[in-house]
Image: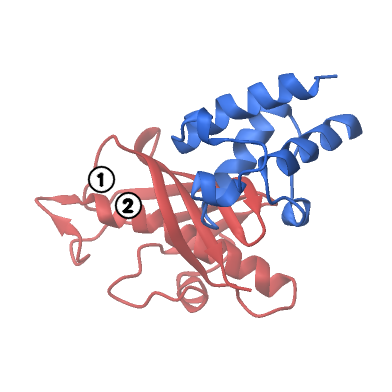
Amino acid sequence: MASRDEIVSTVKEFLSEEFEVDKSTMEPEANLQETLDLDSLDYVDLVVVIEENFGFKVAGEDFVDVVTFNDFYALVEKKLAEK
Amino acid sequence: MLLSKEKTADIIPQKVPFVMIDSLTSVNEDSFISSFIVNKENIFFKNEKLQEPALIENIAQTVAAGFSYVGQQEGGEPKIGFIGAISKLKIHQLPSIGDEIITTVTQLHQFENIYLIKGKNYVGNSLLVECEMKIVVGV
């Protein structure tokens, strides 16, 4: 199973590429939606890159408690553990 | 054929002269297929070819017909979808008068009421246009 550091590194890599955002802006407590400038359509792209990189699907309810990047990393950790 | 030309026209929001599919021919869990014959009265027919906007609209209307059909089969109101975004668009060639366009739409991903689909239309084995679309389906 991937460590938190490995998850953070992978997430930063694909998010910076997909949403054209500098990795340095992805501070653990930064707001995910605001930092990546996500609108509702962009969440489909986020779902796609998550599945491509980690091999699991996410639904709308998975994002209910995701505000910061740390929340997002925790979601990925949880989903990977459930695989 | 799954739906006649008349019934297909009834379940999509577009009206003549903007109707760019004739009939919905197949609906599966994650894919729809339609057919459309090119005629010279089409508003996008120019220089002896059906132009790109008609082919893109053809893909979108195949999605619309498919979702609407599924909605009806589930006993609810027909679902209406809107194009949210078009990406990875490739134009390969344009069809001529009398050609039958067969369009396939495959659902790639879904997030809430937003669907990412892959659309391709063909005449015979010749690929005309391919693209991905994000479709926002009304609930």
Quarter where residue A30 is shown: top right
Q: Position of residue A44 (x, y in %)?
A: 58, 48
Mark 1: secondary structure? loop
Q: Earlier in the sequence, mark 2 or mark 1?
A: 2
Q: Residue furthest right?
A: A82
Q: Position of residue A37 (x, y in %)?
A: 49, 50
The three-letter code of the residue at mark 1 reads Pro
Assess whether mark 1 and mark 2 are in contact (beta carbons under 8 angstroms): yes
Residue under the point 48% across and 38% down: A19
Mark 2 highlights which residue? B55
Instruction: Say which residue appears at 80% left-offset and 19% top-offset.
Output: A2
Q: In the depicted view, which residue is nearer to us: A78 or B8?
A: A78
* Colour of chain A in the rendered structure image: blue
Q: In the rendered structure, the residue with mark 1 lies on which chain?
A: B
Classify mark 1: residues with Cα within 10 Å, few (<14), some (14-19) or many (20+).
many
- Residue B69 in sight from this viewpoint: yes
In the foreground, B102 or B56: B56
Up the image or down, A51 lies above or below B51; here it is above
Disc nearest the viewer among 2 and 1: 2
Q: Amino acid at mark 2?
A: Leu
Up/down of B37 relative to B18, above or below: above
Residue toward you, B103 or B133: B133
Which chain is drawn using red?
B
Does A1 appear above or below A26? above
The circle on residue B95 is: 1
Answer whether residue B122 is visible to the viewer in this image: no
Task: Name the spot of residue B104 as percent of width and height, x first.
Answer: 50, 46
Q: Is residue B136 left or right of residue A63?
A: left
Q: Which mark is residue B78?
A: none
Classify residue A53 by image quadrant.
Answer: top right
